[in-house]
Image: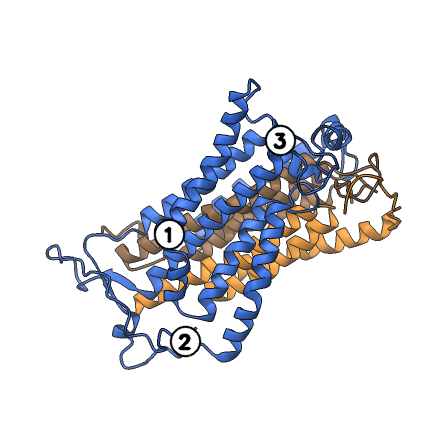
Chain colours: A orange, B blue, C brown
């Protein structure tokens, strides 16, 4: 993966196909956001948030942003649900 | 305001906001028709100027390095804030979780979980290290690598017990590593000042081949330090929250505190189920 | 299609705000705040996209291939990680609120006096 003599790789994904993928993913993101908000039980909402994070990461990939995909995957699907579940465990333990 | 009223007020406000937003949208050039010159100029010049083939990281750590410094210090302040908010208050006692279990022992970690977590800890460490040190070649960078490295530490906790996480990342060491990471970023900028250039200029030798590991001067170095700072910050946050859960801290009496109870020292956790040697 | 990402971002923002306004649990509110922040990432990346362009990484493609805007990607990627830390701070506040007031319902929180 060195940059010296650059090889020209033609990216020949048809634009229409990429657009169809983007439209599908955007609709899924909108549905996912609605699902996250309408889930009122916090523990279930964390799982739905994790799925929403994966959907968002795929959308970023379709927008040609692999760096942002990596960030969103690690943060939105792993780190944030972990922090939320720890908080919920702490709160539930206090209520016992 | 009753919840029903609040809903209507919200809908009215949201309708106004949506109208303004859609009116603003009408002035945008439309999705896919990117007009602005800045992105094209950066794309055309970045590889030649910084010898980094990952242009996003070059923007992050060189062209807009000052913004990244600010963001990193937001992260630093948030981790410090979590430590402060969850600190050991004077009227709090600290008890082992098993004392409150009411005759119910927490079950030991299942073998399947332990096996998978241990198997994945090594590859996660390697992947995180690769991401943090290859900012200039491919989609990688200090921020992503740092979070992946932090999850490697969390896998150790999942495979064992909380005491394992405390052993490999004691709070003082994590604090120190985080401070070193954040301070080094600022110090590299000051080093550029010392050499007569503006703050955070890329003053290290740029290397011969664009995109090689030792190319792009300060970009690789800054990305590495950002990586260890993000790792330490996340490990600190997770440790603080875990301490709250595992070592049950709360009011020593149920009612309002009648006086200051002496804080119990943190007892050595002998009450846990699995012995120390099993890890 | 030319305004779909921005309309979706507006929808996500509206839905998230609705969740914050009508929430009965502090952790649910914090998750809705995460959703609101995601809408800003969609707007940022939508602004920088160029039809038919590729990701701005030139290690294996020619130097002048049309690529999308790298500046908004840089902004978004630091944003994502910093958001997680700020969310952690909010969660710490929620833990302390539960400790002092015994409840996580925003409706009840304003009436109790520690």
Q: In the depicted view, which residue is nearer to us: C10 or B86?
A: B86
Report the residue at 79% width, 43% height from top. Answer: C54
Residue that label 3 marks: B62
Left or right side of B210 for B247:
left
Residue that label 2 marks: B278
Q: In this view, does B81 lie above or below C71?
A: below
The single residue placed furthest to the bottom in the displayed view is B103
The picture places residue B221, in percent across and down from the top left corner, at: 58, 38
Name the mark nearer the viewer: 3 or 2.
2
Asked where in the image residue B209 lies, by quadrant, the reply is top right
Label 1 close to label 3 by CB (< 8 Å): no
Give the Cα distance between marks 1 and 3. 34 Å
The answer to which of marks 3 and 2 sits earlier in the sequence is 3
The picture places residue C91, in percent across and down from the top left corner, at: 40, 53
Q: Mark 3 lies on which chain?
A: B
Left or right side of B22 for C99:
left
The picture places residue A96, in percent across and down from the top left corner, at: 30, 71
Visible in this render: residue C22?
no
- On residue B211, the disc is none
Q: How many labels does the image show?
A: 3
- Count neighbours of disc 2 (C-alpha within 10 A) and say few if under 14, some if 14 to 19, many if 20 or more: few
Report the residue at 51% width, 37% height from top. Answer: B71
Visible in this render: residue A82?
yes
Residue that label 1 marks: C92
Q: Is residue B203 above or below residue C47?
A: above
Q: Do labels 1 and 3 share a chain?
A: no
């Amino acid at each position: 993966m060195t940059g010296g003599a650059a090889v020209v790789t033609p990216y020949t994904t048809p634009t229409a196909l990429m657009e169809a993928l983007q439209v599908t993913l955007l609709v899924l993101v909108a549905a996912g956001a609605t699902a996250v908000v309408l889930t009122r039980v916090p523990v279930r909402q964390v799982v739905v948030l994790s799925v929403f994070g994966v959907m968002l990461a795929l959308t970023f990939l379709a927008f040609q942003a692999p760096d942002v995909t990596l960030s969103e995957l690690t943060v939105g699907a792993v780190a944030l649900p972990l922090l939320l579940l720890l908080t919920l465990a702490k709160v539930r333990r206090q209520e016992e | 305001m009753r919840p029903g009223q609040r809903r209507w007020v919200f809908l009215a406000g949201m309708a106004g906001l949506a109208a303004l937003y859609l009116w603003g949208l009408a002035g945008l050039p439309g999705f896919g028709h990117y007009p602005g010159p800045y992105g094209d100029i950066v794309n055309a010049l970045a590889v030649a100027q910084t010898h980094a083939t990952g242009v996003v990281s070059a923007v992050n750590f060189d062209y807009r390095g000052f913004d990244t410094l600010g963001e990193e210090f937001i992260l630093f302040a948030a981790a410090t804030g979590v430590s402060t908010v969850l600190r050991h208050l004077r009227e709090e006692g600290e008890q082992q979780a098993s004392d409150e279990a009411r005759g119910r022992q927490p079950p030991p970690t299942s073998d399947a979980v332990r096996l998978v977590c241990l198997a994945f800890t090594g590859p996660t460490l390697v992947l995180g290290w690769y991401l943090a040190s290859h900012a200039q070649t491919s989609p990688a960078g200090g921020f992503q690598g740092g979070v992946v490295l932090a999850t490697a530490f969390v896998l150790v906790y999942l495979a064992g017990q909380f005491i394992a996480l405390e052993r490999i990342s004691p709070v003082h060491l994590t604090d120190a590593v985080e401070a070193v990471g954040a301070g080094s970023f600022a110090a590299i900028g000051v080093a550029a000042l010392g050499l007569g250039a503006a703050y955070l200029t890329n003053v290290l030798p740029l290397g011969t081949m664009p995109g090689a590991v030792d190319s792009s001067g300060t970009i690789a170095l800054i990305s590495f330090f950002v990586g260890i700072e993000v790792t330490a910050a996340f490990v600190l946050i997770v440790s603080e929250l875990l301490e709250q859960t595992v070592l049950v801290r709360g009011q020593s009496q149920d009612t309002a505190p009648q006086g200051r109870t002496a804080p119990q020292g943190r007892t050595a956790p002998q009450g846990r189920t699995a012995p120390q040697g099993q890890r | 299609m030319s305004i779909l990402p921005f309309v979706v971002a507006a929808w996500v923002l509206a839905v998230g705000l609705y969740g914050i306004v009508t929430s009965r649990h502090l952790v649910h509110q914090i998750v809705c705040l995460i959703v609101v922040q995601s809408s800003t990432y969609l707007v940022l990346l939508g602004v920088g996209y160029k039809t038919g362009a590729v990701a701005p990484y030139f290690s294996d493609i020619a130097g002048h291939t049309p690529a999308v805007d790298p500046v908004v990607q840089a902004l978004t990627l630091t944003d994502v990680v910093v958001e997680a830390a700020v969310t952690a701070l909010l969660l710490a506040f929620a833990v302390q609120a539960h400790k002092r007031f015994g409840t996580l319902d925003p409706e009840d929180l304003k009436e109790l006096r520690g």
